[in-house]
Image (cartoon, helix red, strand yellow):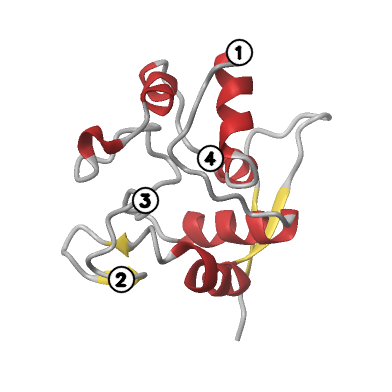
Amino acid sequence: MLKKLLIVGFVTAAAPVLAGDVGAGQEVFEKQCKNCHRIQDDAGNVIAGRENTKTGPNLYGVVGRQAGTDADFGNKYGDDLVKLGAGGFVWTAEELAVYVQDPRDFLKTKLDDKRAKTKMAFKLRKEEDANNIAAYLASITQ
């Protein structure tokens, strides 16, 4: 049975409301994200992905986490993502959905820096997949 999760942040007349399908997000993660990312809880249990996958950071509890701060990933983050986090940026499901569609453009816009770079070259092309991934990751909290 697939669950649907409606994620609502601080909503204003201009703010989008993200609706994503948790089950579909899990499927997208298994097909497109698990080669670089894992979801491993604080007790060491791998929820999704592969245990030894460390190309990208652990995504357990990413929604609500300051960008560029997963302690286990350490200094492997790109400088611009760390800079964004140092400025106080915290991941929301809505922001994550935008980021995974074009990480470089996201950082350029957020930092107002045309030279901003990211180490994440992969892009989710479909907005629906991005919303579903965000809903799935939001459903896995610390």
SS at mark 2 in the image: loop
Residue at the disc numbered 1: 112
Residue at the disc numbered 2: 50
Residue 44 image position (x, y, % from top left): 17, 65
Q: Marks 2 and 4: which is nearer the front?
A: 2
| Quadrant of the rendered image containing residue 38 | bottom left
3D distance between C-alphas at marks 1 and 4 = 19 Å
Residue at position x 35%, y 55% in the image: 60
Say which label, 1 or 3, has the lower sequence index.
3
Q: Which amino acid, by three-letter code, is at mark 4?
A: Thr
3D distance between C-alphas at marks 1 and 3 = 27 Å
Residue at the disc numbered 4: 92
Q: Are marks 2 and 4 in contact (CB under 8 Å)?
A: no
3D distance between C-alphas at marks 4 and 3 = 11 Å
Residue at the disc numbered 3: 61
Q: Residues within 10 Å of mark 1 (few under 14, many from 20)?
A: few
Q: Which amino acid, by three-letter code, is at mark 3?
A: Gly
SS at mark 4 in the image: loop
